[in-house]
Amino acid sequence: MWGNQRGWILAAIIGLGMGALLCFAVIPPGITRPTGTLTLAMKPAVFATDPNTIVPPPTGDTDAGPIYLKAGNEWSDHQMVYEEMTRNITDTSKNVPDAVKDILSAADCGRMTLFTNDLDDVINYHDRRPALEGLYNAGDLLNSLALLHTTDHYKNPKRATQYALAEFNLGRHLYEERIVFAEWMDGLNLMANAALVLSKTEPDKNKADADKDFGFAINDFLKGPVQKLWQIISGIDDQETATYAGDIFQIARESPERMWRVEATLKLGRFRYNAATKGDQIGARHAVREMAAAPTLSSDPLTQTTVHAAALAAANLTIEDYRNQ
């Protein structure tokens, strides 16, 4: 029986080799390793200069959220009328519209829960977020009115300052809530524009220079590293999708910044259909299902709820909805 010992040994080696190949073939491919280069997304999204050093925070106990939501919906519901107002700013200054009045009325509100209680309004795969877009546009109109009152013919420093402070506080609230990138970016832009107006009405030269520097620094910040990072997280470029897939997984799971975690988690929902490798597609399915099944623990309750909401949206994204984006 054992006469052909050499043959049996050879057969065993071949069998072991085939078994190893078979096992390798059925093992799911792993996800792409992170490059480690998207460092901006792996730290809190806090601007270098504290906004509170430019404008002291408001102290009122009222929640600005419902007031701002009313302003955003007012603009969205009457968009064409408001767009006409932006083209006739001198006429608009004589009869300030309701959406702008709402923002002015919330200027002293010390807190804001705008989308915290209705996360689906912003954590989704829709092309537009009407309430947020309307609110930003109303704030931008307020900025135009503030600037108008710094010009010679309509000069009114007190009113320009009042308008700019209300705009700045709107921006600060959006920046601080920052559930999604668009909210954070809108907040920074509004603060930057308001600070530039304040630099024109501030009598103290040193303070005026600080206001101006703050506004320009935000503009430079958003055009530099932030723009590149957002292009990677939100974009559909095949090369970038393949290169940074591992980073997206890491950001979704480990970033200390809820905004980046939310956006990266939504990206994982798309990865289920467009990731460059089978391993990343399978990994994305597993990741969003796991995150949707149980909220990720976090010391920040808002981070916990927002990331979970993003995971639910990602897990429920159908191929039809993906194709219709």
Image (tube, rainbow, N blue to C red):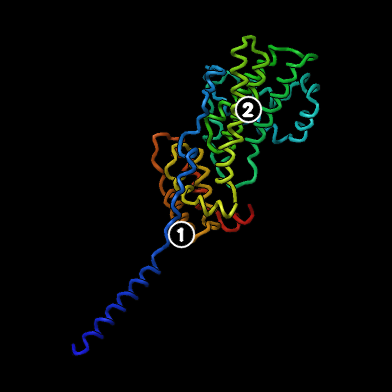
Locate residue 123: give its quadrant.
Answer: top right
Residue pictured at 56% horizontal, 31% vertical: 114
Q: Name the element at disc 1.
A: helix
Label 2: how many Cα within 10 Å (few below 14, some 14–19, many 20+): many
Question: Which disc, if any, is residue 190?
Answer: 2
Locate residue 102: give its quadrant.
Answer: top right
Q: Position of residue 194 (x, y in %)?
A: 64, 22
Judged left or right of residue 8, residue 230 is right
Name the outermost residue toward the top.
203
Residue pictured at 45% horizontal, 45% vertical: 36
* Vertical arrangement, residue 248 with respect to residue 24, above or below: above
The residue lying toward the viewer, choosing from 284 and 85, is 284
Judged left or right of residue 269, residue 161 is right
User: Which amino acid is tagged 1?
Assistant: Gly
User: Which amino acid is tagged 2?
Assistant: Leu
Q: Earlier in the sequence, mark 1 or mark 2?
A: 2
* Vertical arrangement, residue 45 with respect to residue 97, above or below: below
The residue lying toward the viewer, choosing from 191 and 162, is 191
Locate residue 218: give its quadrant.
Answer: top right
Name the image quarter holding the N terminus.
bottom left
Q: Position of residue 105 (x, y in %)?
A: 63, 20
Q: Position of residue 96 (x, y in %)?
A: 74, 21
- In space, the residues marked 1 and 2 are separated at their CA atoms by 41 Å
Q: Which residue is mark 1?
A: 279
